[in-house]
């Protein structure tokens, strides 16, 4: 998060059973955690991902959560964007359409006005570090692609039917969206549907929007049962709903700050499983954080809602969780440790809230040097 520093992702450590001001690694084999109170101070030097800015390609394969295998353009050459034009030589669109792996960087700052969706092909990193880049008009489309990293960009003012800031569908996988600012699009800010999976959304700032993030297309798309998404260290800043709304998929939410929603914070619909861990929910006028919607999957006889499990979440300013009593079927609720061994969790304290307010979204971070990496 700009200048924040963190533990290396692959170092294991257990939950600390004593209240501690520092973030801890969750290790499911360790003792049960005791979450420190919100008066504790979080050590800003101990947040995840500091090492990813040590060199240009250090981002590759470093996401926490379901998107942890995303390598982007690690094995490709550096492609430099030298124009803010929508298309043509040196444009972002030209780089994204190339079939070879590329690490895409920008040699100038400014706004790129997209006249149509910008399709991103497999094995690409779109790296906005070192410049101020805004995309407007339309958004990115990640269609049937894999191993894409999008970092340090701003998305604003997308217009037209079904126009999302970042649209991930169909059948895309191994995606990491990190440190992006997204606001004011006609439809969603990030939509993940049509059997797209193994995705991490981290350190993003969402604001000035209605339908923020949809995961799972509709009840007829039963193939979306494969969807797996991690959302962590994001700031949902007064956006109205869908933080996220989930159908069918498995979603791990941790260390996010969601405030002043207009309808609900998180919605679980048909067969979804949402594991909400150490998040901060701060209501405005609407007090209920969690909402359940009943829908009927196309291959089932009866409708069903989804499941939400809340562990260590902080509900403030009169927020009511709105959790349903767990039914027998909820015993099948997934646990993140079934899919990845560790992730870095901080207590849901005031210091975490302050950090997410100031250190999410596009950051003023210099572009690191392209140092040699040991690529196997």
Image (cartoon, rainbow, N blue to C red):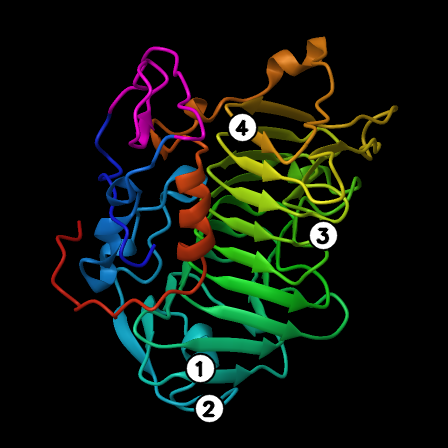
| Residue 340, quarter of the rendered image | top left
Q: Which residue is mark 4?
A: 313
Horizontal and vertical percent for residue 110? 44, 84
Q: Are marks 2 and 1 in contact (CB under 8 Å)?
A: yes
Viewed as shown, does residue 243 lie left or right of 106? right
Distance CA(mark 2)–CA(mark 1): 6 Å
Question: Distance of mark 2 from mark 4, alpha carbons?
Answer: 48 Å
Residue 192 position within the rendered picture, expressed as x and y whole percent measured from the top left: 61, 50
| Crowd class of label 2 (few under 14; some 14 to 19; many from 20; radius 10 Å) | few
Q: Residues within 10 Å of mark 1 (few under 14, many from 20)?
A: some
Task: Give the extent of the magenta segment.
Answer: 13-39
Secondary structure state at the residue bearing disc 3:
loop
Residue at the spot of label 2: 88
- Dot 4 falls on a residue whose secondary structure is loop
Q: CA distance from mark 3 to mark 1?
A: 35 Å
Nearer to me, 24 or 150: 24
Choose between 205 and 269: the one closer to the eye. 205
Indicate which disc, 2 or 1, sits on the residue closer to the N terminus: 2
Residue 341 numbered mark, or none: none
C-alpha span from label 2 to label 3: 37 Å
Q: Is residue 54 magenta?
A: no
Label 2–label 3 contact, CB within 8 A: no
Residue carrying label 3: 240
Kindly report which numbered mark, 3 or 1, lies closer to the viewer in this rendering.
3
Circles 2 and 4: CB distance less than 8 Å?
Answer: no
What residue is at 40 percent from the left and 16 percent from the top? Answer: 34
Q: Is residue 144 above or below residue 317?
A: below
Between disc 2 and disc 3, the foreground one is 3
Which residue, given by chain and number where applicable, does mark 1 sit on?
94
Residue 54 x %, y %:
18, 58
Which residue lies at the image location 88% right of the left edge and 24% below the top edge?
301
Q: Nearer the viewer, mark 1 or mark 4?
A: 4
């Amino acid at each position: 998060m700009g200048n924040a520093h963190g533990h290396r992702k692959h170092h294991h450590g257990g939950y600390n059973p004593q209240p501690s001001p520092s973030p801890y690694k969750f290790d499911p084999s360790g003792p049960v955690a005791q979450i420190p109170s919100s008066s504790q101070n979080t050590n800003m030097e101990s947040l995840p991902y500091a090492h990813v800015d040590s060199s240009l390609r250090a981002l590759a394969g470093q996401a926490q959560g379901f998107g942890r295998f995303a390598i982007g353009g690690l094995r490709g050459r550096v492609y430099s964007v030298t124009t803010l034009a929508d298309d043509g030589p040196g444009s972002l669109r030209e780089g994204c359409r190339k079939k070879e792996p590329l690490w895409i960087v920008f040699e100038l700052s400014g706004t790129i006005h997209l006249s149509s969706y910008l399709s991103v092909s497999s094995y690409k990193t779109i790296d906005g570090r070192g410049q101020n880049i805004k995309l407007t008009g339309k958004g990115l489309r990640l269609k049937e692609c894999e191993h894409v990293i999008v970092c340090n960009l701003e998305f604003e003012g997308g217009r037209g039917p079904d126009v999302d800031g970042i649209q991930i569908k169909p059948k895309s996988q191994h995606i990491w969206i990190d440190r992006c600012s997204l606001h004011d699009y006609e439809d969603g800010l990030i939509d993940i549907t049509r059997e797209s999976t193994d995705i991490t959304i981290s350190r993003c700032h969402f604001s000035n929007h209605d339908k923020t993030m949809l995961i799972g297309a509709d009840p007829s798309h039963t193939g979306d049962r494969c969807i797996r998404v991690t959302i962590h260290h994001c700031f949902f800043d007064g956006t109205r709903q869908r933080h996220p709304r989930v159908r069918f998929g498995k979603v791990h939410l941790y260390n996010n700050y969601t405030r002043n929603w207009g309808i609900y914070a998180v919605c679980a619909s048909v067969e979804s499983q949402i594991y909400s861990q150490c998040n901060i929910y701060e209501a405005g006028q609407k007090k209920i954080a969690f909402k359940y919607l009943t829908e009927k999957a196309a291959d089932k006889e009866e409708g069903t809602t989804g499941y939400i499990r809340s562990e260590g979440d902080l509900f403030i300013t009169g927020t009511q969780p709105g959790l349903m009593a767990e039914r027998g079927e909820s015993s099948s609720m997934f646990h993140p440790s079934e899919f990845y061994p560790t992730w870095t969790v901080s207590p849901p304290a005031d210091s975490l809230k302050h950090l997410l307010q100031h250190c999410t979204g596009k950051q003023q971070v210099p572009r690191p040097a392209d140092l040699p990496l040991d690529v196997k």
